[in-house]
Image (cartoon, helix red, strand yellow):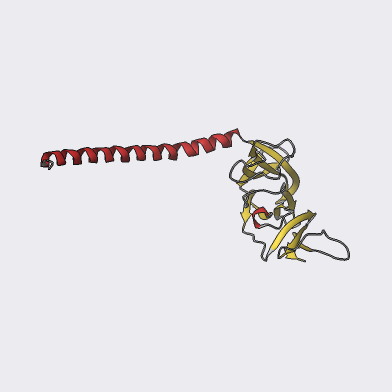
Amino acid sequence: MKKLSEVKNISKEELAEKKRMRKGAIIFILIVAVMFPVIWFGLDWLATEYPLSQTTITVNGKERLLKFSEKKRGYNGSHSIGNRGSNSTGDYESGVAHHGYFLELVDSVTKTSINKLKFSSPVHEIQETPKMYVSANGSIWIVSTSRSNREEESGFILKFTIKNDVVVQEDYELKGNYEIHDMEGNKVMLTKDNEFYQGCAPIIGCIYLDLETEKIE
């Protein structure tokens, strides 16, 4: 039988080893916690902001330039800005990582930036380059379409307004089981319940969201 002193020594050694292991685990977690944001912000710094579209608007009687752009890292030579396959969290087969969109309000005279809002894609994988539309009442719409009916490859619609020269994102939800397929002017072409999209023929007709009235026709 082991002596009592030997058992105590073993217990002390085991306790010391456990303390060393816990200390090592804590140090590792702290390193990961510090390095992850450093790496992400480093990649964000390396990403490039690309212009997508711009338009002149009037805000409180003053002419402003509204710019819409995307910040991304990497590119695919077979696609243009806002490639199909770019995504909101990291690189996929297209080699494009989405780092965010921007709506920027610029003074038309001095060309200086008044306000700039950054926002992210609400879908994991961006299917088509989003388009910007400004309605008569001043609402700003960002619309990304999709040719697919699959939930994981859906488009999106975002709504913004300008209040006191500040771009503000509004709560907006396309109610109903609709898929977003195309956009013509103020009309966003839809299908419902996973129906096949066949365009908007004069005889057959189509379902669409009117961005001026915000009604589905």
Q: Nearer the viewer, residue 158 or 21?
A: 21
Whether residue 156 is situated above or below residue 81 in the rendered picture: below
Left or right of 52? Residue 28 is: left
**Quarter of the rendering containing residue 24:** top left
The number of callouts visible is 0
Q: Can residue 212 be seen at all in this image of the molecule? A: no
The residue at the point 54 percent across, 34 percent down is 42
Which residue, as the protein is rendered here, is positioned at the far right? 203
The residue at the point 29 percent across, 37 percent down is 20
Q: Nearer the viewer, residue 114 or 207?
A: 207
Query: Where does the C terminus fall, quadrant-wise?
Result: bottom right
Tell me where residue 133 appears, x and y as whole percent: 74, 52
Left or right of 166? Residue 191 is: right
The residue at the point 49 percent across, 39 percent down is 37
**Quarter of the rendering containing residue 139:** bottom right
Left or right of 33? Residue 104 is: right
Q: Nearer the viewer, residue 183 or 60?
A: 183
Tell me where residue 212 appears, x and y as whole percent: 76, 60
Whether residue 38 is situated above or below residue 185 in the rendered picture: above
Tell me where residue 47 appears, x and y as whole percent: 62, 35
